[in-house]
Amino acid sequence: MRRLPPLHALRAFEAAARHLHFTRAAAELHLTPTAISHQVRQLEETLGVKLFHRYPRPMRLTDEGAALYPVLRDSFDRMAGAIDGLSRPDTTRPLTVSVTLAFASLWLMRRMPQLQRDTGLHLQVEADNRPVDLSEHLVDLALRYAAEPRGPDLWLPLFEDRLAPYCAPELLQRQAAPGDADILRLPLIQYRWSGGTEAPPSWQRWCHAAGLDSTPPAIAQQYSEELNAIDAALAGQGVVLASSVLAASALAEGRLIRLSKTDLPGRTFWAVCLRDHPRQAEIDRFVAWARACA
């Protein structure tokens, strides 16, 4: 007979170890953070070892916890896969992911080979700025940009975003990096901020954050889509106040440069799926990989 600790305690530990956060584990398992903490302590008492270093923050695994976590992760993934195979015979189909046009073009597409190598996942990417209805079961996972979760679905945070001024290196014509006031003398690019009730990240707000004159600066180019505004900046046509997440690849490759330390708060990128999704193990694998990319 197998002698195992309570399954609920093992599941609580695996979720907490994957997130390294009791609150996020609690949200995933529909429990309270207190319940997660209690179940993890119950497991620690059963095993006679500590599984987490809780202080100082951030929380991290002990050697014993690090040894146990991958065993449980892989076991739960296999269990979920077997159950999924019974209820969903088409599990060999790609995981369908809905993303915005900008996220697809500037973040996801260039990382697809790495995603497949690291996770073994195959995606079908649905690029559209219109939010999908997950209850129609046509999409497994949606990437959304929002200040906070909305609705009954499972919202898993990926990246916190900031908005900063970026331009192509050639726009500066080999001059020294400009100061904040000098940026306003360059052609400014702006795009329409979609959805949400918070104030849009305009150049006027950026001027206020930088402590500059509050007079609205002149805008050289305006676009409805962030993707087009960033493309214009990449082409050397001006400076765009863009997402640090979406600009990251071009920044790393030297195709964009950041002109100022002054930035504005953005929203959060979330991975959203139905609760108790039959392919939750694959979704969790995508989420963990995406967070690691950050």
Image: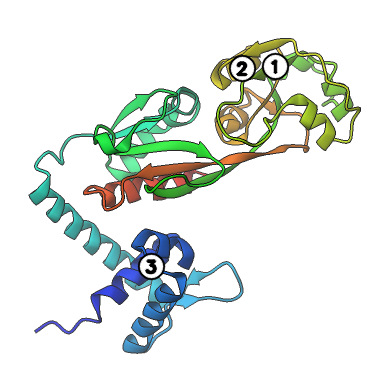
Name the residue tied to disc 3: 31
Name the residue tied to disc 2: 229
Residue 234 appearing in the image: yes
Q: Earlier in the sequence, mark 2 or mark 1?
A: 1
Q: Earlier in the sequence, mark 2 or mark 3?
A: 3
Discs 2, 1 touching: Cβ within 8 Å: yes
State how far apart marks 3 and 1 are (Cα). Answer: 46 Å
At x 34%, y 51%, the residue is: 284
The amino acid type of the residue labelled 3 equals Leu
State how far apart marks 2 and 1 are (Cα). Answer: 6 Å
At x 33%, y 28%, the residue is: 125
Q: Please say which color scheme the image uses.
A: rainbow
Name the residue tied to disc 1: 189
The 10 Å Cα crowd at callout 3, few under 14, some 14 to 19, many 20 or more, is some
The amino acid type of the residue labelled 1 equals Ile
At x 48%, y 29%, the residue is: 103
Viewer-side residue, 264 vs 45: 264
Is residue 45 shown left or right of residue 231? Answer: left
